[in-house]
Structures are given as C-alpha cells and as structure tokens.
Image (cartoon, rainbow, N blue to C red):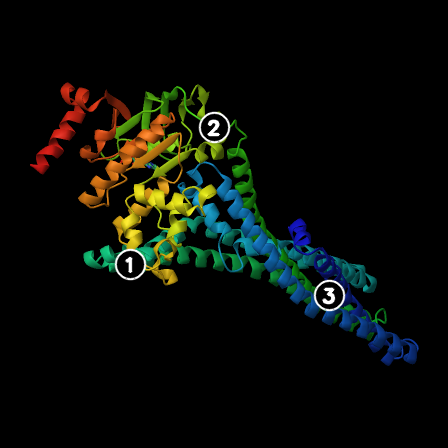
Amino acid sequence: MLALSVRADPKVASLVGVLVVFGAGALALTALAQRWVVDAAAGEGRLAVGVVLAAVVGAAGLAAITISTHVQNNLRNDLSDRVEVLLNQEILTSASRIPTIEHLERPKYLDRLAMLRAGGASGTRALSVSCWVAVETAATLFGLGLTVFLLADVHPALSLLTLLGAAPLVLGDRGDRLVQRALDETAEAARQEQALHDLCALPGPGKEVRITGNGWELSRRARNLWASATRREVAAQVRGAAWRWAGWICFIAGLVAALGITVTMIRTGRATAGDLVLIIVLAGRLGEQIDATLDGVSRLSEAGRVGRHYLWLQDYAAAQTRDGCSAPYRLRDGIVFDDVSFTYAGTRSPALREINLRLPAGSVVGLVGVNGAGKSTLVKLLTAMYRPTSGSIFVDGVELADIDAAAWRERLSGAFQDFVTPQLPVSEAIGIGDLSRLADRPAVLAAAERGGAAELIDRLPHGLDTQLGRAFDGEELSHGQWQKLALARALMRPSPLVLVLDEPTAALDPQAEHFVFEQFAEQCAQVSANGGIVILVSHRFSTLHLADHIVVLSDGRVTEQGSHAELLASGGEYATLYLTQAKGYQ
Ligand SMILES: Nc1ncnc2c1ncn2[C@@H]1O[C@H](COP(=O)(O)OP(=O)(O)OP(=O)(O)O)[C@@H](O)[C@H]1O
C-alpha cells in the first residue's frame, strides 16, 4: 500500500508521513509543558524560566498537533482516494485477466470478490488507508513510549499503567476478530439478499415477478436473510464490545491505583504537584493513545482481512494465467476430445464423462441433447472457460491447455443463449465482436446483414449511430432484436477457428430465423473453407440441417454421432427427439 501511495503522489506521501510522526511526539511535549508550569507556579524552580520554557514547548506542541491534524487529514484523504482508484483498477485488471470463469461462478470466490468490492470503510477503502493507519499507529506507539518514559520518571511502578493499558488492546483485538469472523460468515447471505432484491427491483425480472405475484415472497426471503445476517452480526458486535469493556475496566483500575501512589508520594514529599498534573494529563492521553492504537489495530486487522482477499486474487490470477504457445492460424486436422471428463467445482457428479470426440477441420457440427445433457459445458471447455478435470483437448495435436488462452479466444467467435445487451451506439454494440475492426463501418454493416439486423438498423432513428438502452436515453430493443445484434457481433470476426452458435435464433421470429439460416449457410461455408469449425447447439431440429456431423449428448456422455440421415435411420435418441418435435408441427 505504501508503494501504491508513493506511486499515487510521492511528495504528498512523504509529507503526510513526516506530519503524522511529528504530531504524535507533540502530545508528550504539551504534557511536559504543563508540569513545568505547575512546578514553576508552586516555586519548585525558577518561575520566569519555567513559565517561558513551558509556554514555548507547549505552544510548539499545540502548533504541531494543529498542523498535523488539519493539513495531514486533508492530504491523507485525497491520497487515499487516489490509492483506492488504483487498487480498484488493479482488482478489475486481475479479475479480467483470469482466463477461466470459475471465479465468477463459485460462491467461495464470489464472496471474496464481493468483500473486496464492498463499499464504506470496508473493501478497498480499508486497504487504501491502511498504510497511513500503520504509520499513524506506529507514531502513536512512539508517543506511548514517551509517555511510559515520563511515567517511570515519576515512579517506576507507574510505568505498569501502560501494561494495564494493553488490556483494552489485547481484549479489543479479540472482540474485533469475533466481529470479522461474523462478517465473513454472513457474506454469502448478504449476496443472496442482494440478488433477491435485484429480482424485485430491476426492470428485467420485474415483469415475471409482478405477474406471478411472487414479489412479496421474494422480499420476505430477502428480509429473513437480512434479519438472520444482522442478528449474527449484532450478536458478534455485542460480544466484541464485552471484550473491549473488560479491557477498559482493567485499565481504569490501574489508573486509580496510579493516582493513589502519586498522592501518597506528594504527601511524603517524594513528588510534586506538577508530577500529579503530569500523571493526570499523561493518563488522559494514555487513554487517547490506547484508543487510537486500538482503532489502528482494528483497522489494520480489517485491512489485513481485505488484503488477504486481494493477495488471493493476485495469486489466483497469476496461477491461472500461464504463458502458452500461439493459436494456429488455420486448422489442418481439427479438434480432438481425448477421454475428457469435467466436474464443476462443488458438485459431485460429472457434467461430462469420458468424451472421445473428433471435430474435423472445416466441419459444421450439431450438438444435440435434452436439457442438462452437457452441451454448454462442452462448449465452455472448447472455449477454454474451464479446463477438463481429466483427459485432454487437442487442437491440431497441440494440447489446448498449452495454448495461450487469450490467443485462443482471439480466434473464436460465438453467439450464446445468454447474450449480452451492451448499451452502446449500434455500430459499437456490433463492432466489439472484433475490436480490431470496431471503427470499420463496412465490416459492421456486413456483419449486421449476415446476422439479420440490417433492416432493424435501417429503422432506427440514427442508423448505426443510434444509442441503445433506456438508461442512456437511447432506443430500447426487443429480446429478438437484441439477439440479432448478438448474432451480428458473433459474425464480426472474418475467419474464426471455431464459431459457436449456441441456440442462436431462439428469440427470432420464423421469418427472421429462415433468413438468418440462409446467411449462416454462407458463413459456415466461409468458416469451413478456412479450416474453421462451426458448432451449432440447438433444440430446434429444423436448424440442424446445416450440420454435416451431429453429436448427441446424454447425461454427459456422447451416445450417438453421425449425419442426420444416419442418426434417423438408427432409430436411437436423436430419432426419438426429432420425431417428437416433428409430430408437434403436424
Ligand atoms: N456453473 C455450473 N456449476 C455447477 N453445475 C453446473 C454449472 N453449469 C451447468 N451445471 C450442471 O452441468 C450439467 C450440464 O449442464 P449444461 O449447461 O452443460 O447442459 P446443456 O445440455 O447445455 O443444457 P441446456 O439444454 O438446458 O442448455 C447440468 O447437470 C447442470 O446442472
């Protein structure tokens, strides 16, 4: 964090450091000044010298405190803001460079990311201020050392007061750890509560929630989650506070004893009235110093908790990112699944089992199977979103795991069932399918034509320059119209090695679907001519006529494969599914 602060502004970072230490030492100076004044007034030394010295030292101490609190607070806040921005950028960069998507799906990882991104004094804020909290805590400890020295100067036993002062520190830390554990344990419930609230509050799911009338039930569940998480947190806060109070009681008992010792010493002439004032002032400061140290330790411990999540993310990103070889320019042989099995983390049964499959270069492969058969999982492995649990995928004989994930993805294209709806101008909403041609309007228009979106664009008020999305005062599109743009986006890359079309026309009307499939035939031919493979995942058998090889998945296994005619003739699962659907149209 210190390095980030220095990176954000080296001059301000050094100035703040000096001011913090200066301010902490000044506290002891003002206490000394008060003793000198009292002793001088009581005639313990030379009056004029004592008063002048006390006034000079006291004024210097007060000036130091004023400067350090006013100047340093402003500078520190500004610096911490800048460090927080840098940290957030690093977190986003690390998260986005992870080639697989496991961290976006596993609750354990999502909780860590949510904790990192938490607002308020937690999350990156806690981390960004941590280095100043550490400097400040070190400076407070330095002030504490001076206090011990001055107390021991009056009577060595009085330095024990500081030991008792450690009681709130140790017991308070124990209380803080209880609270932090509770926060960690309720993180998942907090995410679930947020997800339920989003279902009720966001416009997308709002329709279904209102028609089914299940909004109150979802809100009730969200409230229950919130209530149980809050109960858990409040209970931890109360227990934490009890530990802290126990610490303070020890300290106050010690303070009473210290005052007793000093009064006895004054009576026997072994201490002065100035010493009593010094003890009272230092004990009062000791309270502040211990409080500040406790607060510092608690904030450092919160920063440590967030820091562990931050380091985990960095390590995880580094472990997942391997340098690999480049992707082939053109497929010669094809892609081979060699005994590939895959089990999602946290689940018991494999989603794919012992898949042995050859996808020849230049082929159009249809993937068929009932819901949950494993089609999307196979596509996720092929696009390197996940790595096989066992077995290997080979691309022209090179293991996919050895190919640089980013380089491999650059050679893929895809339109998926859960397509994104980027609220950008139309040209960019399509152009981001191939960043290298984002500003290439003829290429964007050609992709729009192939995706069946050309007519839609013609009808928009500013054509390709029309802003999309109501959130930005733009045009809102229907689900099917958004899918046409998703298709156009997928068709931006001219010659991908693999083109994945996962239910690409599910939201299109029959006319649009017919038109798009005519275009697809051309696109498939173009991809195939370059040795690329088209993967067509669909429940609509009418759309599979483009496929020259069909693979049937069932319960994670390849149960049949062949051409449409071969599979129909074999009378297996494909034939049953096909005939069931055909009957529905009669
Ligand atoms: N992210 C995930 N985490 C855990 N299990 C998953 C995940 N995604 C899918 N599964 C499980 O893996 C199995 C295969 O799912 P997959 O999405 O690959 O099926 P599919 O054939 O594409 O289904 P559909 O036709 O409904 O899209 C299912 O049993 C599903 O529950």
Label placed on residue 551: none
The front one of 372 and 271 is 372
Label placed on residue 258: 3
Q: Is residue 322 left or right of residue 107?
A: right
Give the residue number, with chain letter if any, for mark 1. 220
Three-letter amino acid code at disc 3? Ala
Q: Dot 2: what SS?
A: loop
What is the spatial separation of the Cα atoms under label 1 and label 3, in whole angstroms? 56 Å
- How far from the left and from the top, in percent, is residue 118? 48, 54
Is residue 375 visible to us here? Answer: no
What is the spatial separation of the Cα atoms under label 2 and label 1, in whole angstroms? 51 Å
Q: Is residue 569 left or right of residue 316?
A: left
The answer to whether residue 358 is above or below residue 462 is above
- How far from the left and from the top, in percent, is residue 176? 55, 54
Three-letter amino acid code at disc 1? Arg
Give the residue number, with chain letter if any, for mark 2. 327
